[in-house]
Amino acid sequence: MSYFIDRRLNARHKSEVNRQRFLDRYRTHIKRSVEEAVNRRSITDMERGEKVSIPARDISEPVFQHGPGGQRTIVSPGNKEFVEGDQLRRPGGGGGGGGSGEGNASNQGEGMDEFAFSLTREEFLDFVFDGLELPHLERKQLVDLEEVRPVRAGIARDGVPSRINIVRSMREAQARRIAMRAPIKRALREAIEALDAEERKDPVLRNPARITELKDEIERLEKRLDAVPFIDTYDLRYNNLVNQPQPSNKAVMFCIMDVSGSMTQSHKDIAKRFFLLLYLFLERNYEKVELVFVRHHTAAKEVDEEEFFYSRETGGTIVSSALSLVDSIITARYPAAQWNLYVAQASDGDNWDDDSTTCRQVLLKSLMPRLQYYTYVEITPHAHQALWEEYETVQDEFPERFAMRQIVESGDIYPVFRELFRRRSQQ
């Protein structure tokens, strides 16, 4: 068995293979640092890398040492400056080594600096979204003919060189050579036998002209055998590929954010950070996920990404307006038979008194039968209100596809996000 080791160096003379091995070995420490970084970052600062520190005691590795006993021969190099018994001046710095530079002087204790390194943007996001997925993602029926996959469909005589089937081509060449050379070999064998029979005759009865004719025939047949090509363009066979329509796994995520007057600026910042995490997660991990942004107060409106995150519009609170708008958008543009439908809602739970019951009815009768997954995040440090109580009824009806969580402060955003979108096989 042969092993090929890629020792090519990447930028700044660092081995990418060794770096990946290091990240895998200390994944637990790095994930802890990444979680802390996500919780303390601002809305616009989620995509940069992160500096990670690992305690030096955790990166120690085993070493080989000579055990006691046995015979060893050691040759140590000498020097011209020091001999046995010389006294050396203590290095500066108060202890012979560096430190963190913090705290007061002490006459006891020892330690070691932490090992620090930086994660790139890609590595940071890999750790942020590790182990997350869209729940209940299914393959739907055919959406259009653009979503196809090339599949093998036998062998063809025509094709491009990259699709040549070497085994079939060599088999065809061998069959052709056998078919073309067989009659020539048979005629050659008969001519050689005739020549041998003629030469064994008595010199008186031997026919010199016949012998010359047979020799010329043998030479001609041997040339014909040599002229049969080993492989010909006629022998080439190619793998035939056809485009086969594939079931669609397209998905759409509806992001619903409450921007009513009851949502303070702190609540809105937490909601924006939650949706920004969701946006980065979908953009990074899925190619065929569309996002629909909906803001609502007393009225709901579909907006673009810029207006969703930065608009200052506000007003009263009627949550059912957003749910009804999502329902109408699904009916008009995203048939449930062709799309995986997801909804993520963030609100402080405050709603018009009679509207919470309307929200429950819209969810039970119209939305939930068509959705793959619905997540509701309530941003409030207080007790739950009527909207949460109505949503609990929906959760009891759809326990696997409806999830609710409460966020009290910004430090709860990332843990709640991971809990809502964790990979189901890990539960």
Image: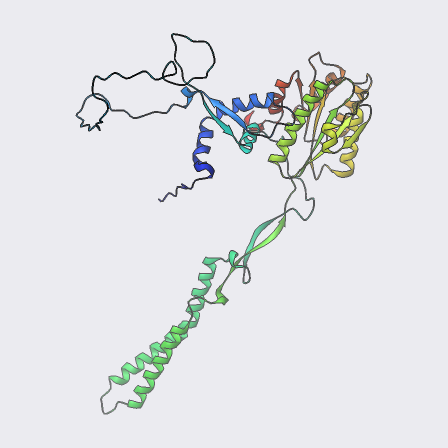
Which quadrant of the figure has residue 86?
top left
Residue at 31% across / 90% down in the picture?
209
**Residue 136 seen anywhere in this rendered image of the structure:** no
Residue at 47% across / 13% down in the picture?
102
What count of labels does the image hold? 0
Residue closest to the far top = 107
Closer to us: 119 or 388? 119
Looking at the image, is 250 positioned above or below residue 379? below
Residue at 49% across / 66% down in the picture?
233
Residue 292 image point, x, y percent? 72, 33
Image coloring type: rainbow
Closer to us: 79 or 423? 79
State which quarter of the image contains the C terminus. Answer: top right
Residue 79 relative to residue 173: left or right: left
Looking at the image, is 183 positioned above or below residue 206? above
Closer to us: 205 or 219? 219
Which quadrant of the figure has residue 126?
top right
Residue closest to the far bottom = 204
Residue 184 image point, x, y percent? 39, 75
Residue 315 image point, x, y percent? 81, 21
Which quadrant of the figure has residue 83?
top left
**Residue 381 seen anywhere in this rendered image of the structure:** yes
State which quarter of the image contains the N terminus. Answer: top left
Residue 391 image point, x, y percent? 73, 20
